[in-house]
Amino acid sequence: MRRSILLGLLAVLPVASLVTVAPAEAGGGVCAGVARCHVVAHRDVNGNGERDAIGVARRGEQGAQRGHVVVRVLTDSGHRAAARRSIRFWSGPLYQGAADVDGRAGREVFVGYQQGAHTQFFRSLTWRDGDLRTLDAPGRGHTWIIDGAFNVAYGWLRKADDDGVIRRRIAVRSETGDRFRGRVTKFAWTADGWDRRGSWSRSISEDQAFRWGGFHVPGLARW
């Protein structure tokens, strides 16, 4: 009799209810216990080739002078890591994407830090020894800057086939008004951090300057 009842229940249960829950999901998810946390992506953050859940929560109001962003990562094996970083005058979504920037296994998570009239500053978090740590921008301390305005463009270029190499591109409008002075600086990741590998500058057109602004990095939104 009991066997008949069990077989009957199995026959009517939805297929999804019979699927084994993965360890990462069994613990309640990446946002478990964190107010206003949202899952923003599933990417390989710890570098083991499996996708990890990324959650982001804001502390403070939109555009407030001061606040915080909480970034959480839950790996496919169920390990959780979290980081809390300050934000200033930030409106809109904080998550910019996750990209392989330094050439090491695992993607870096980019979140907003500060907004100006047209300039944006970001922080990058990378996986180190089971925790999330800050990955400094080449030559700029903790923040990655992007800009795209009438007189200036500021951006980053990461070619998909150029492992561990990134280029900073800055263009400033010249006194003549119709040309920009563009400067590209190349950086490569080493055991000691970012190493400057040279730079060049030349006059470029307005159209080219405007194309330089923002992130041109696979995995990151441009603006």
Image (cartoon, grey):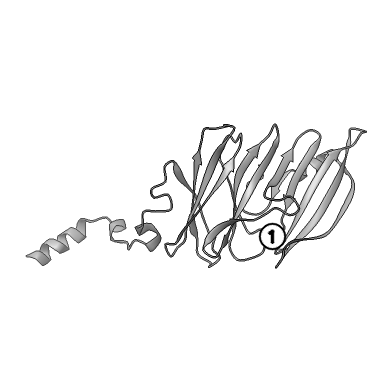
The residue drawn where x is 82% and y is 43% is: 171
On screen, residue 162 versus residue 197, left or right, reads left
On screen, residue 62 versus residue 136, left or right, reads left
The residue drawn where x is 50% and y is 39% is: 59
On screen, residue 76 versus residue 115, left or right, reads left
Q: Which residue is mark 1?
A: 160
Q: Could you tell me the amino acid type at mark 1? A: Ala
> Based on the displayed image, in which of its 4 quarters is residue 106 positioned?
bottom right
> Based on the displayed image, in which of its 4 quarters is residue 136 positioned?
bottom right
Could you say which is closer to the camera, residue 147 or residue 194?
A: 194
Could you say which is closer to the camera, residue 5 or residue 119?
A: 119
Circle 1 SS class: loop
Q: Residue 147 location, x and y as percent?
A: 73, 40
Q: Residue 211 location, x and y as percent?
A: 76, 43
The residue drawn where x is 50% and y is 64% is: 50
Could you say which is closer to the camera, residue 41 or residue 90?
A: 90
